[in-house]
Image (tube, helix red, strand yellow):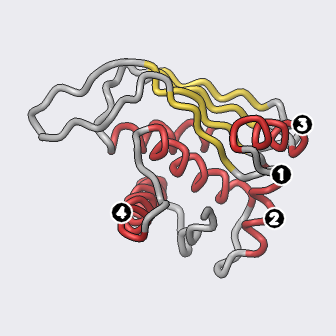
């Protein structure tokens, strides 16, 4: 799995954890090991520009996903997953920090960025949360991936509750 993390935000973030949880999420979703993903960490001004340009919405957001080859998880266990370019995930630590502080179960900016990385991966794989049933599926999968990764890493305490909407 080729995953690049590029921090352009000026904020110190745990890039290794972002890389690790992205790799874990892609493996859990059975994405081809030669697929490629890019994660870019930007400041609030850059995120706001992207949010306006692509979503026509004001202000910075927490995460944006830009799919490339529209890869999807294979349907059956014996099915060979396709290889390709997943796309880009853009994260904003300033928004992540605020969301982590305001969450029901308060957590750090880095924990929020980990959650947002998984959220972005799932969007790249075609998951969405516009409808209640889609939201339940995506957020359930997101929680299972984050919990599994945290357990594998031996991290204690409650996993961050979903703060993305």
Cα distance between the residues tagged 4 and 3 = 34 Å
Quadrant where the image shows the N terminus: top left
**Where residue 10 is drawn, which disc sits there?**
3
Q: Residues within 10 Å of mark 2 (few under 14, many from 20)?
A: some
Cα distance between the residues tagged 2 and 1 = 17 Å
Sequence-wise, the earlier of marks 4 and 1 is 1
**Where residue 58 is drawn, which disc sits there?**
1
Relative to 17, say whether 71 is above or below: above
**Is residue 119 left or right of 110 when viewed as pictured?**
left
Give the foreground label among 4 and 1: 1
Give the foreground label among 4 and 2: 4
Sequence-wise, the earlier of marks 4 and 2 is 2
Q: Position of residue 124 (x, y in %)?
A: 47, 38
Q: Nearer the viewer, residue 20 or 163?
A: 163
Give the foreground label among 2 and 3: 2
The residue labelled by disc 4 is: 137
**Does any portion of residue 151 appear in the rendered image?**
no
Cα distance between the residues tagged 1 and 3 = 22 Å
Cα distance between the residues tagged 4 and 1 = 28 Å
Relative to 92, say whether 5 is above or below: above
Sequence-wise, the earlier of marks 4 and 3 is 3
Cα distance between the residues tagged 4 and 2 = 25 Å
Q: Describe the element under mark 3 as helix, strand or loop.
A: loop
- Residue sitting farthest toward the bottom: 104
**Where residue 98 is drawn, which disc sits there?**
2
Sequence-wise, the earlier of marks 2 and 1 is 1
**Is residue 89 left or right of 134 when viewed as pictured?**
right
- Residue at 46% from the left image edge and 27% from the top image edge: 86
Q: Nearer the viewer, residue 35 or 107?
A: 35
**Does any portion of residue 64 appear in the rendered image?**
yes
């Amino acid at each position: 799995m080729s995953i690049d993390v590029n921090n352009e935000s000026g904020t110190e973030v745990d890039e290794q954890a972002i890389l690790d949880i992205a790799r874990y999420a892609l493996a859990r979703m059975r994405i081809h090991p030669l697929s490629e993903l890019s994660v870019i960490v930007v400041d609030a001004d850059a995120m706001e520009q992207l949010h306006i340009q692509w979503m026509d919405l004001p202000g910075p957001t927490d995460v944006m996903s830009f799919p490339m080859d529209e890869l999807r998880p294979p349907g059956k266990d014996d099915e060979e997953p396709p290889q390709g370019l997943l796309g880009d995930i853009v994260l904003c630590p300033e928004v992540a920090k605020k969301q982590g502080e305001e969450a029901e179960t308060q957590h750090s900016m880095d924990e929020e960025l980990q959650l947002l990385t998984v959220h972005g991966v799932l969007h790249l794989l075609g998951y969405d949360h516009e409808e209640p049933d889609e939201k339940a599926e995506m957020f359930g999968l997101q929680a299972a991936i984050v919990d599994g990764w945290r357990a594998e890493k031996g991290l204690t305490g409650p996993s961050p509750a979903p703060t993305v909407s």
